[in-house]
Amino acid sequence: MGVKMQKDLWESIEFFKYQEFNSPDHDRSGMLMNYEFMCILDNIRRQHGKPIRINSGYRTKEHNDHLIKSGAKASPGSSHMKGLAVDIKCNDDKERFELVNLALAHGINRIGVAKTFIHLDVDKEKNQNRIWIY
C-alpha cells in the first residue's frame, strides 16, 4: 500500500473528494492519502448507502504534534501521517456496528472505537488484528 493519490486517481473515487482528507494546516494534503485505502473507503461508503463524514484524514507532522500537545488521542507515529488512516464521525451505535462490520469485511483489521468516531487504518507496519477503544 504505497501509492499516494494524484488528481487523476481521485477522479476514480466516487463518494469522496480529496479536500475531505486535508490536514487543517495544509491545503491539498488530502492528495497524500493512499490510493488503495481510498478505494476500500469508497467501497465501504457504497455498501453503507449513507454519507460518511471524515473527521480526520491526512495529518501533517506539525498538526499531529499540535494534537498531541493539546491532549488529543494522537500518537507520534500516527498512520494518519502516512495517509493510511481516517477517523469517521459516528455517534450512533447501529451505524457504528455497520461501519465496523463493513471495515472488517473489506480487510481493515486495525479499528479504534470512540464515542463520536471510528478510526480505521491499514498500516501494515503496525500490529494487525486489533480493535481498541478510546
Image: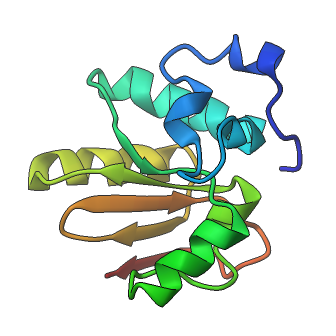
Q: In which quarter of the image is residue 98?
A: top left
- Give percent across and percent down for residue 60: 69, 62
Residue 102, quarter of picture: top left
Image location of residue 56, percent across then percent down: 47, 54
Q: Residue at x 22, y 53 (%)?
A: 96
Q: Which residue is drawn at 56% across and 31% down?
A: 19
Above-or-below relation of 63 to 17: below
Q: In the picture, which quadrant includes the C terminus? A: bottom left
What residue is at 83 percent from the left and 50 percent from the top?
1
Image color mode: rainbow
Where does the image place residue 29, in percent across and percent down from the top left?
Answer: 70, 43
Which one is in front, 72 or 3?
Answer: 72
Residue 115 in the figure: left or right of residue 59 = left
* Image x and y of residue 72, in percent: 39, 81
Relative vertical location of residue 69 with respect to residue 27 in this rendering, above or below: below
In the figure, is residue 90 to the left or right of 79? left
Q: Is 129 placed above or below 93 here?
A: below
- Identity of the residue furthest to the right in this view: 2
Q: Which of 67 and 80 is in front in this view?
A: 67
Residue at 30%, 26% in the rendered image: 51
Q: Viewed as shown, does residue 42 lie left or right of 72? A: right
How many discs appear? 0
